[in-house]
Amino acid sequence: MTLIRHVIAGQETGAADRTGPVFNPATGEVAAEVAFASADEVEAAIAAAKAALPAWRSSGLVKRADVFFRLRQLLIERQDELAAILTREHGKVLADAKGEISRGIENVEFAAGLVHLLKGERSEQVARGVDVHSVKQPVGVVGAITPFNFPAMVPLWMTASAIACGNTVVLKPSEKDPSASVYLAKLFEEAGLPAGVLNVVHGDKVAVDAILDSPDVKAVSFVGSTPVARSIYQRGTANGKRVQALGGAKNHMVVMPDADLDGAANAAVSAAYGSAGERCMAVSVLVAVGDQVADALVAKVAAAVKGLTIGDGTDPSSDMGPLITREHRDKVASYVTGAEAEGAKVVVDGTAQEFDGDGFFVGVSLVDDVKPGMKVYDDEIFGPVLSVVRVDTYDEAVELINSSPFANGTAIFTRDGGTARQFEVDIEVGMVGVNVPIPVPIGAYSFGGWKNSLFGDSHIYGPESIHFYTRSKVVTTRWPDHTPSQVDLGFPSNH
């Protein structure tokens, strides 16, 4: 059995005394074992990052940028190989895996502009002979804890910006699909990144707690569920760390009566069921304004899903692959099987679809007449389940969304510019799409929600990541001249 090991100071290491299974979700078979790090092994990775920090921080900005230019090219050249790793361990179809890689490359491209991004400011002659300038300096060793659903993209979200800013990193990927992070570490090394700047440790809560408790880790980035995000934020900040912890989501897509209903239905199907719904930006609630709109959308979505092919992600004919684990598949199915008891109407029951073999497959589901208070509405299901909520007015739609404890992403479909603009103003959500169902920002902007979808004050990647991974220092200077000095106990004035 293949053992997936840690990468510490450029070397693969890790014993097989404590491991976890890595499944191929399409077959249900254990494809490999992954070593689970002990607290001592995590400390070794942190020590390696700390030892590599001075030299990397002192490296020239152009030299750093060169690493990212080379990394970008390697990711493009090796995308088929990396996509195959993603599909084998996560289950998403190959086309979706390549899409994930392309969005990760965007962040590498952003990081390659570090010479511009790390510029400070300068003001001359703020007082006679006094100048002021600011600089951005790295925070130090950074911990990055990433989820299973984007095993290449999210690590690149964190590591690219952190390393570009002169930090060193200890990356703890999901133990469910860990190979992509090891592969990325090797690509970074091939691109010229010195050993120890990026270290990868696998494991469970033992590894996470070691990162959160180490005094040598100065900042932590996390993406995962809301309960875990809250816990990581609290523990990390209690230990004096800078923390950004992105949590769960329940993304609503509002469809107005004037919308292109065919386009809206197709967008809802794509956004709800892509990657088997295992996306924090998936549309999970379709908010139809008016029963006429709702009836039309339900019919169109139900018709569209009949044409979806669910199967092994390596099969080019598959539109959707399996879920990540058998346990998660069963949990997702329970929301559908219990929906009618709560008063909802199951229009398409994906749990009734049968599949050959032991893969973690489930069909897509469409549930109508869903209301707040039902588990199918309140919980983040993280699977191919689309709920339809009927409202009478635009104001009811806005109130519904703003009442949710989650505020990651939302979208509105309309032909009316005034309505779209008002939605931008009214809605209390971090990322908004107008006729765009999954409004994930391009790499030049930042990704993040509000409320229980984000703990901390910095969004991930883009400009806000530069703020998060650096500390600003302001320097005030005056050089001796021939003006006589004197004692002055008053507070310094610039007049």
Image (cartoon, helix red, strand yellow):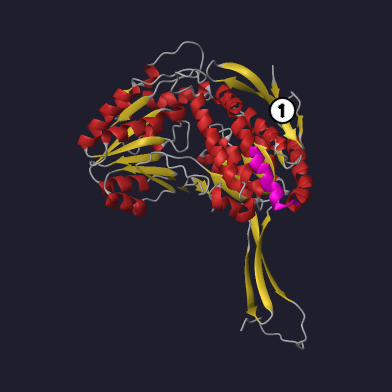
* 70 drawn magenta: yes
Q: Along the line of sight, which residue is nearer the eye, 175 or 416? A: 416
Identify residue for label 1: 5
Q: Is residue 275 above or below residue 161?
A: above
Left or right of 90: which side holds 33? right
Task: State which quadrant residue 258 falls in.
Answer: top left
Left or right of 332: which side holds 61? right
- Residue at 40 percent across and 21 percent down: it is 363
Q: Secondary structure at mark 1?
A: loop
Q: Amino acid at mark 1?
A: Arg
Across and down, in percent, residue 38 comes to 73, 33
Across and down, in percent, residue 140 comes to 71, 51
Q: Is residue 280 above or below residue 177?
A: below
Name the quarter where the C terminus is drawn: bottom right
Can residue 80 be spotted in the picture?
Answer: yes
Can residue 174 be spotted in the picture?
Answer: no
Q: Is residue 488 above or below residue 15?
A: below
The part of the chain drawn in magenta is: 59-71
Q: Along the line of sight, which residue is nearer the eye, 475 or 62? A: 62
Majority secondary structure of the magenta segment?
helix
